[in-house]
Amino acid sequence: MENRLYKTYKEKMAQDLKKQLSLENIMQVPKIKKININAGIGGFKENREATESFINELADITSQKPYYRKARLSEAGFKIKKGDVVGYSVTLRGYKMWAFLDKLINIVLPRVRDFRGLSRDSFDNSGNYSLGIREHVIFPEVNPNATRGIRSLQVTIVMNSNNKERNTALLEKMGFPFKKV
């Protein structure tokens, strides 16, 4: 089973990017390797019901069970001890990655209130793109009336190229709504 975004990438976008970027070989076209979704639990770590509710919601959003992230260091100001669970993370690859990306571009981002576009400056030195989502309830799988607290998510799109211009061209071709320059 193939995702429609992946099928379009394979059949049309890759060839278009090869021409647009003046690349010699189709293997030089940037590709998305994986997507990491991270969420901290913050002040809800004491509330077991709210934490379990969020874990289920994150699993519904990503179609994959999240794994917990523990604190590496103790931090008295935040009442965190080394080894405490401080967040949850999901790494998507393959079909689930393409399905999540398609949903993010076509359903989730248009639902953001007062959305003015994504920043082009959110690339790191390795060419990966990160974006923050303030409210996880913008995903269609989450019922905003039944959720027990609103959480933020960080979505990192990991690509095989460390060239920012190539990666920006790939994301634009996929339909990412960047701010107009």
Image (cartoon, grey):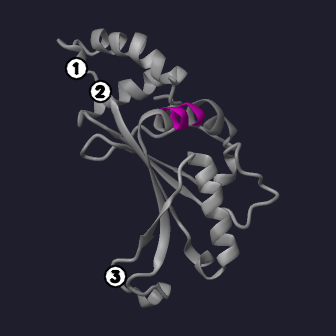
Mark with earlier residue (3, 2): 2
Q: Residue furthest bottom?
A: 76
Tag 3–tag 1 contact (CB < 8 Å): no
Q: Residue furthest left?
A: 24
Q: Position of residue 4 (x, y in %)?
A: 54, 20
Tag 1, which secondary structure? helix
Q: Residues within 10 Å of mark 3 (few under 14, many from 20)?
A: few
Q: Position of residue 128 (x, y in %)?
A: 33, 42
Q: CA distance from mark 1 to mark 2?
A: 8 Å
Q: Which residue is mark 3?
A: 73
Q: Quadrant of residue 19?
A: top left
Q: Position of residue 156 (x, y in %)?
A: 41, 47
Q: Who's the residue at 77% across and 55% down the image? A: 144
Q: Which residues are magenta?
A: 98-103
Q: Nearer the viewer, mark 1 or mark 2?
A: 1
Q: Residue furthest right?
A: 145
Q: Is residue 157 left or right of residue 124?
A: right
The answer to whether residue 62 is above or below residue 30 is: below
Could you tell me if residue 83 is visible in this image? yes
From the viewer's side, name the closer residue of 111 and 56.
Answer: 56
Q: Which residue is mark 1?
A: 27
Q: Amino acid at mark 1?
A: Met
Q: Position of residue 98 (x, y in %)?
A: 48, 32
Q: Quadrant of residue 164?
A: top left
The stretch drawn in magenta includes residue 147: no
Q: CA distance from mark 3 to mark 1?
A: 42 Å
Could you tell me if residue 117 is visible in this image? no
Q: Which residue is mark 2?
A: 30
Q: Who's the residue at 36% across and 10% down the image? A: 16
